[in-house]
């Protein structure tokens, strides 16, 4: 496919090592030359298109695989584990990432309401969705990345090309999910408000009833929709956010294990160690030794 070949060339030429920002607002490029072990992160709302290689993203045990010519959408902040499964120096993983900004999607929906097909506002929610990218979507992305060679033109033309990409997504197989991400009063937006609260106050004790009220839902309805979107209960979600944050703190300061656990809301070192081991496959003490380069992990 011509669009994929051109996309590979552009990403390969402009991407640095790893995930790098570009002068184009909201656009990042990913280049990796080796497979990786699973790495936890809190993913932000974005669409990622793979031009070469294969990446797997796991959400609470469910694995989503996407490779060349496919895109993955994450509509809300989610604690995930990512792993590159096909990449080498000769054939690196190459990917285009566009952050999904609610206000851009909302503006497009407002301006195109009369011409828009019925996207299915009541469609089922999904935390991660993978689909094949259409030639039209790939072409729009290619033309956007070509602006990296024309900085003077980028400020004028990039916003229009981002709109085209969003339109291709809205009218594609994941249109209902993208639409939900753009409507301020949608079920997805209501849940996103609660997710934002959990992310900002992950170290505190949160009441599910308060989160449900923030989402303008009953507790039962909130539980059902939250689980449908994230595959977790709100408490499990908060726990994963806590552990991802603890891992980040250990990366910065592997000598302070107790401090990392306490900072994210654990007042019991044994509970912190137990839950960290369950999520990452090793105790925080073992992980800290690896980060300091001292020895291999203890078996689980």
Image: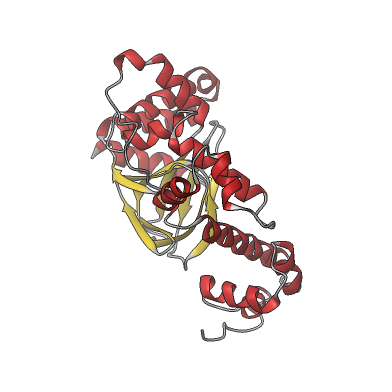
In the displayed orientation, state which residue is furthest to the bottom.
299
Relative vertical location of residue 5 with respect to residue 108 in this rendering, above or below = below
In the displayed orientation, state which residue is furthest to the left.
1
**Quarter where residue 111 is shown:** top left
The residue nearer to you, when weighing 16 against 296, is 296
Q: Is residue 45 visible?
A: yes
Point 51% across, 63% down: residue: 39
Q: How is the image coloured?
A: secondary structure
Point 70% across, 74% down: residue: 268
**Quarter where residue 163 is shown:** top left
Q: Picture coordinates of residue 269 (x, y %)?
A: 70, 76
Screen quadrant of the N terminus: top left
Q: Picture coordinates of residue 62 (x, y %)?
A: 37, 61
The residue nearer to you, when weighing 226 against 162, is 226
The residue nearer to you, when weighing 297 against 115, is 115
Point 62% across, 61% down: residue: 242
The image shows a total of numbered marks equal to: 0
Q: Picture coordinates of residue 201 (x, y %)?
A: 67, 51
**Quarter where residue 180 is shown:** top left
Q: Is residue 21 visible?
A: no
Point 57% across, 41% down: residue: 213
Relative vertical location of residue 291 with respect to residue 83 in this rendering, above or below = below
Q: Is residue 120 left or right of residue 297?
A: left
Relative vertical location of residue 208 with respect to residue 289 in this rendering, above or below = above
């Amino acid at each position: 496919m011509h669009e994929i070949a051109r996309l590979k060339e552009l990403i390969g030429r402009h991407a640095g090592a790893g995930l790098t920002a570009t002068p184009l607002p909201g656009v990042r490029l990913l280049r990796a030359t080796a497979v990786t072990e699973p790495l936890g992160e809190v993913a932000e709302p974005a669409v990622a298109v793979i031009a070469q290689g294969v990446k797997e993203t796991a959400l609470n045990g469910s694995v989503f695989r996407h490779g060349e010519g496919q895109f993955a959408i994450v509509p809300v902040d989610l604690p995930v584990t990512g792993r590159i499964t096909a990449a080498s120096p000769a054939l690196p993983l190459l990917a285009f990432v566009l952050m999904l900004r609610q206000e851009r999607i909302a503006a497009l929906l407002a301006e195109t309401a009369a011409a828009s097909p019925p996207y299915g506002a009541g469609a089922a929610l999904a935390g991660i969705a993978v689909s094949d990218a259409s030639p039209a979507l790939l072409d729009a992305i290619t033309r956007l990345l070509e602006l990296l060679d024309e900085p003077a033109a980028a400020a004028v033309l990039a916003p229009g090309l981002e709109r085209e990409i969003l339109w291709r997504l809205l009218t594609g197989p994941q249109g209902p999910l993208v639409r939900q991400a753009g409507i301020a009063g949608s079920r997805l937006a209501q849940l996103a408000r609660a997710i934002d609260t959990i992310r900002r106050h992950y170290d505190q004790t949160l009441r599910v009833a308060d989160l449900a009220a923030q989402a303008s839902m009953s507790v039962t309805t909130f539980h059902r929709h939250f689980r449908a979107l994230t595959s977790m209960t709100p408490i499990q979600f908060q726990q994963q956010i806590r552990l991802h944050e603890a891992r980040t703190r250990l990366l910065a300061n592997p000598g302070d294990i107790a401090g990392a656990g306490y900072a994210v809301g654990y007042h019991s070192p044994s509970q912190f160690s137990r839950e960290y081991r369950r999520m990452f496959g090793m105790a925080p003490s073992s992980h800290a030794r690896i980060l300091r380069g001292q020895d291999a992990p203890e078996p689980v």
